[in-house]
Image (tube, rainbow, N blue to C red):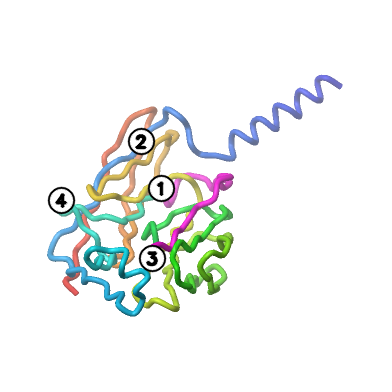
Amino acid sequence: MRTKQAFIAGVAILAAATMTSAVPGGGTVSGKVTYEGTPAKQKPIDMSKEPSCAKQYATPPPTETVVTGPNNALENVVVYISAGAPDEPPPSQAAVLAQKGCRYLPHVLAFQVNQELKITNEDQTSHNIHPLAKINREWNKSQPPGTPPISDKYDKMEFIPVKCNVHPWMHGTFAVMKNSHYSITGADGGFTLPDLPPGKYTVTAFHESYGDQTQEVSIAGSETKSVNFVFKAKPY
């Protein structure tokens, strides 16, 4: 009986271990995402029709369709392992999108399939959030000020444009990922994908305006491989 129980426990431990592809101390893929050419100049947002939001800014904030940094760095690019890593169960903590100052914070929100998504309204005005899913279920919901967060989940991988049906300048992106091997570039365009077990991988970089690019990479042991992406900017 004890032998059988020990066997069952061992199987359970093995199953739990194989549910995630992250290996602490494993290999790493890191690099930068940049652009070449001249990107479209981001325009200041006119929030005059929503004074409660406009007054939160000393100067009107710019649109965020293309955000650049020093040395041609490209921000808000989702870099992820698109092939070579297994699917993973979602983390227990929720991913949170805040509506604040009539903007989506963060502009690009990445989270896993079946991970809880919470959307908060921190403004003194109503919003109507409308994720334009094509693979997952499309929905739109009104969220008056002071109401509880909206909670939802997505069961398929997809990059989903998000808009507000009340405030036309509010745009963002949901990146629904199959596993935890993803990163979003900041102002320096840098990204890091750690804890990869040995193997061959496809690394993909996705930008909401410039599309996606892929590269192949092989990881052995705890080595770090450098992968860089260069997008061609569109001046419009």
Query: Nearer the viewer's eye, disc 1 or disc 4?
Result: 4
Q: Where is residue 230 in the image (x, y as percent from the top left)?
A: 21, 55
Q: Give the crowd class for mark 2: few <14, some 14-19, many >=20 residues within 10 Å.
A: many
Q: Name the residue under label 3.
A: 172
Q: Where is residue 171 in the image (x, y as percent from the top left)?
A: 37, 69
What are the residue bounds of the magenta stretch? 81-102
Q: Mark 2 points at which residue?
A: 28
> Which type of secondary structure does the marked residue at label 3 adopt?
strand
In space, the residues marked 2 and 1 are separated at their CA atoms by 12 Å
Q: Where is residue 31 in the image (x, y as percent from the top left)?
A: 26, 43
In space, the residues marked 4 and 2 are separated at their CA atoms by 24 Å
> Which type of secondary structure does the marked residue at label 1 adopt?
strand
Q: Residue at x 24, y 66 (%)?
A: 62
Q: Mark 4 points at which residue?
A: 70
Q: Nearer the viewer, residue 142 or 77?
A: 142
Q: Name the residue under label 1.
A: 182
Q: Which residue is drawn at 42% across and 52% down?
A: 82
